[in-house]
Amino acid sequence: SAASDVYKRQKKRRNIMNKLKKISILFAAVLSLTMLASCGSDSKDTNKSDKSDSSTAEDKAVFGFKFTVNGDEYAVPAPFKDFADKGWEYDGESDEKVPAHKYLIGAYIEKDDMDPSVYIMNDSDDEINVTEGDISCIGFDQFDMKNNEIKYGDNITMGKTTLEEVKSAFGEPDYENTLEDLGITTIRYEKDIYIEVEFKFDESGILNGFTLTNQPTDF
């Protein structure tokens, strides 16, 4: 299965800012898991796994997997070349390889002051250079939006759109979790395994990150 074939490599950061970013994200993730495991956790976790199989208009809209960064249009999955043509570079060793029928996680691409995380997929029968693969997952966070306009679809904008506006546009999510102590809310729309859209909101309910995952489970 794809899950057992995951090819994991931890990437080196190019500068101190990126190192600090990774450390802060890791710390937040560990803290979140610790709080969720605690008996006294104040988190509110709602899982709507019994959602009807019938697709609504909102379902179709949320799974468009198209986004814009400073006016440039993108989608996932897409060849790495589509990103490179718009100025993005791989944030790692230039000779990095991805084995046949595997994907690389823990990778990053960069442009200006943005450094989103990505999965890079190789659906071919041969080992390839990382820049020859397809980007099948991309995740932006609060660091990326600082000086940039990042939008999902036509109207969902990081740093502006609220939790209620996302729900109004796409309907109730399949998963929702709020860490009361940190003021962080995560919602997720799930179409299939490895096909999902996740949004994160700050303590004010403003969108400050999203992750798009759109890759086959068998390749």
Image (cartoon, helix red, strand yellow):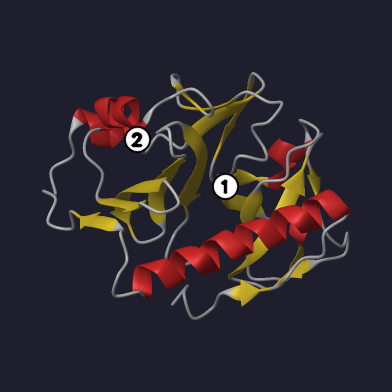
Left of 100 or right of it: where is 181?
A: left
Q: Residue at x 62, y 50 (%)?
A: 135
- Compared with 140, 216 (above or below) is below
Q: Indicate which disc residue 62 carries.
A: 2
- Compared with 204, 140 (above or below) is below
The answer to which quarter of the image holds residue 82 is top right
Depth check, front residue: 140 or 107: 140
Depth check, front residue: 107 or 200: 200
Residue marked by disc 1: 139
Q: Point out the image quarter for the N terminus.
A: bottom left
Left of 91 or right of it: where is 5?
A: left
Q: Picture coordinates of residue 74 (x, y %)?
A: 59, 32
Answer few, some or many: residues within 10 Å of disc 1's Cα (few below 14, many 20 plus, some between 14 and 19): some
The amino acid sitting under disc 2 is Val
- Compared with 161, 36 (above or below) is below
Left of 143 or right of it: where is 77?
A: left
Residue 107 seen in this snapshot: no
Residue 36 seen in this snapshot: yes
Q: Residue at x 49, y 22 (%)?
A: 160
Q: Picture coordinates of residue 28 (x, y %)?
A: 56, 60
